[in-house]
Amino acid sequence: MIGGPKLACPNWCQDVINLKSFALDYGFHGIDWTLRPDDLPTNRSEEACFVSAMAGLAPLEVRYHLFFLDHELGDLDAEKARSAMRDFYSALDLISAVSGRYATVHVGLGRDTMEGISWDRTITHLRDVAAKARHHGIRLCLENLVRGWSGRPHLYEKLIRRSDCWGTLDIGHAHVCDSVMSQAYGVEDFALPHPGKILSAHIYHEETAEGHIPPRDYSDIEDRLRLLRRLPLCDWWVLELREEAALLKTLDCVSEFLAITEARVAV
C-alpha cells in the first residue's frame, strides 16, 4: 500500500450530525455505513431523506456495508433467492443515488451452517450482483465470516475469483475462525492468494459471543495490521466497534501502530 490507510468508523449512532462531529474530532477519514433490509426506502420521500443524510456527512468519505441477514443469494428456495437478489439490487441503486463507490456483502451471514444453500447458485447470483454493481461504478467486496464458506480461506478465494468480487478482510473474524484456530491456515491465507483484490479491512481484536472485542494494545493486532500493509489496494480500515470507548481504544492502538511503522520507514 502506498501511503497510509484511510481510517473509518461505523455509523455507531444514527444521528448524522453527531456522527460527523465525532468522526472529524477524532481524525477519521470516513464512515462505513451499515444498511439493513429495513433501511431500504419504500418511496421517493424516504429515498430523498437518505440522500440528504449522506450528503450531510461530507467531506467524510462514505462506503457501505450491506448487513442482510437471511438474504442468501444461493438459497435452495428459488423465490427466496430471487427476493434476496431484488433487495441487493435495490441497495445498489440506492448507493448509486448517493454516488457511493464501494459496498461490502456476505455469504452465510448469521448462519452456523450452509445447509439449504447452493454453492453454484451462490456463485451465479453473486456474480450477477457484482455485475450490477459495476454497472453503477460500484466495487462489490465480499467479507470473510467466522463460519461458513467464507470462513475457509480456500473457499473464500474461490468465491471471490468465481464471482468476480473484490474482498473485505475482517481480521477479527479471521483470527477466531476454525481454519485458523486449528492452525490448518493462517490469517494471511484469506488475503495472499489475491492480494490485489482486498480493498478494505474490518479491524478489532476478535469476535466473541459478546460481540467485537477491542485489542488490549497494538501488539494484539500488530501482525494482522502488518499483513494489511502488504495489500496494495487495502486503503480503507474500518475500526468496527459500535461502543465509543472500545472504538477509541482501537483507534489508539491502530494510530500507535501506524506511528511506529512510519517512524521506522523514515529512518
Image: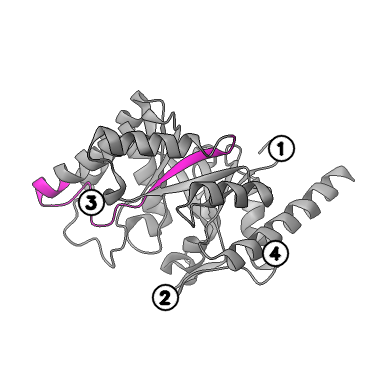
Q: Are marks 1 and 4 in contact (CB under 8 Å)?
A: no
- Distance of mark 4 from mark 2, alpha carbons? 22 Å
- Residue 127 seen in the current view: no
Disc with the residue nearer the chain's start (1 vs 4): 1
Query: Identity of the amino acid at label 3?
Result: Glu
- Distance of mark 2 from mark 3, alpha carbons? 23 Å
Q: Which residue is mark 1?
A: 3
Q: Which residue is mark 3?
A: 72
Q: Which residue is mark 4?
A: 218
Residue 192 drawn at (x, y percent)? 54, 47
- Distance of mark 2 from mark 1, alpha carbons? 36 Å
SS under mark 2: loop
The residue closer to the viewer here, 251 or 144, is: 251
Residue range in magenta is: 59-81
Relative to residue 249, is residue 163 depicted above or below? Answer: above
The residue closer to the viewer here, 195 or 106, is: 106
Q: Are marks 2 and 3 in contact (CB under 8 Å)?
A: no
Estimate how packed mark 2 is, as few (under 14), some (14 to 19) or many (20 or more) residues with alpha carbons within 10 Å.
Answer: few
Q: Which residue is mark 2?
A: 209
